[in-house]
């Protein structure tokens, strides 16, 4: 399944979002504003998927899903920019980034906090690769409600399929754990390469084996590695 969909005309929103509005709602500091200025050309609120625009009922966690288009000045976008927009908009968001006639999809799993329904919990971000901007889009996934639609749209961006019947929150938590464990293995490898004393190398090797075994457990049915966190175009 592609991560790019043909959205219904009834859901078209098409409003340019002033960066100043994001700054205000996200409490942006000078450094964050600088990122917006350097990396983002324009933000467009492209589509609003809601009961009245999709004929799908809302759920407690997902009352609407919004599609934001970000045209970039370079092939890189700092994750802090996305988090600021997610913080400013109190609905689940799917981002479509465009640069040099290419596009990629980016999104985090976003849900209301169980402790405080006015707060949102935002996972790490999932990122597709770049594809031509005119590449074909698929119809929206078939779903019974907006919650299921959001799950399927987000799953299309995620780097690994689910384990059996795990729900999307469990899947996101597992992928976040894969990312964290992958970083841990990389850090241990760096320490091992730097260490010269034999007895210390033995201990570090044991630590690395343990971390790799845990990583293998997390990825048993999904050997593909987690996606990187940034939105950089690595092909230049």
Image (tube, helix red, strand yellow):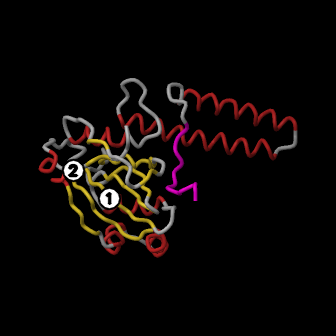
Which secondary structure dominates the residues rendered in magenta? loop
Vertical order, 233 against 58 (above or below): below
- Image position, residue 178 (x, y; %): 53, 37
Q: Is residue 232 left or right of residue 201?
A: left
On-image quarter of the N terminus: top left
Closer to the camera, 74 or 62? 74
Single out the residue that lies furthest toward the right: 197
> What secondary structure is marked by label 1?
strand
Q: Which residue is mark 2?
A: 49
Residue 233 belongs to magenta span = yes
| Range of residues picked out in magenta | 225-236
Q: Is residue 87 left or right of residue 101?
A: left
Badge 1 local density, few (<14 within 10 Å), some, or many (20+)?
Answer: many
Query: Which labelled disc corresponds to residue 105?
Result: none
Q: Which mark is residue 68?
A: 1
In the drawing, does residue 158 fall left or right of residue 201? left
Label 2, label 1: how far apart the Cα atoms are:
11 Å
Q: Which of the pair 102/55 is nearer the observer?
A: 102
SS class of the residue under badge 2?
A: strand
Q: Judge whether residue 97 is colored magenta.
A: no
Does the CB distance between marks 2 and 1 fall below 8 Å? no
The residue shown at (17%, 43%) is 58
Q: Quadrant of residue 141?
A: top left
The disc, 2 or 1, on the residue closer to the chain's N-terminal end is 2
């Amino acid at each position: 399944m592609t991560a790019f969909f043909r959205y219904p005309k009834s859901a078209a929103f098409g409003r340019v979002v002033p960066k100043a509005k994001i700054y205000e709602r996200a409490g942006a500091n000078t450094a964050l504003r600088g990122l917006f200025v350097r990396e983002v050309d324009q933000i467009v609120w492209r589509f609003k998927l809601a009961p009245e625009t999709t004929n799908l009922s809302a759920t407690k966690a997902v009352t609407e899903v919004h599609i934001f288009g970000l045209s970039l000045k370079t092939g890189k976008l700092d994750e802090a920019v996305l988090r600021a927009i997610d913080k400013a908009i109190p609905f689940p968001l799917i981002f479509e980034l465009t640069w040099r006639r290419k596009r990629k999809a980016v999104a985090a799993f976003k849900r209301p906090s169980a402790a405080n329904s006015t707060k949102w919990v935002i996972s790490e971000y999932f990122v597709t690769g770049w594809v031509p901007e005119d590449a074909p889009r698929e119809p929206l996934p078939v779903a019974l409600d907006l919650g299921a639609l959001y799950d399927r749209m987000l799953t299309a961006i995620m780097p690994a399929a689910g384990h059996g019947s795990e729900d999307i929150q469990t899947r996101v938590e597992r992928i976040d754990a894969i990312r964290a464990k992958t970083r841990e293995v990389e850090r241990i490898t760096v320490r091992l390469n730097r260490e010269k004393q034999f007895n210390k190398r033995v201990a570090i090797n044991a630590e690395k084996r343990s971390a790799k075994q845990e990583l293998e457990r997390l990825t048993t049915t999904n050997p593909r590695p987690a996606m990187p966190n940034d939105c950089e175009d690595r092909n230049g």
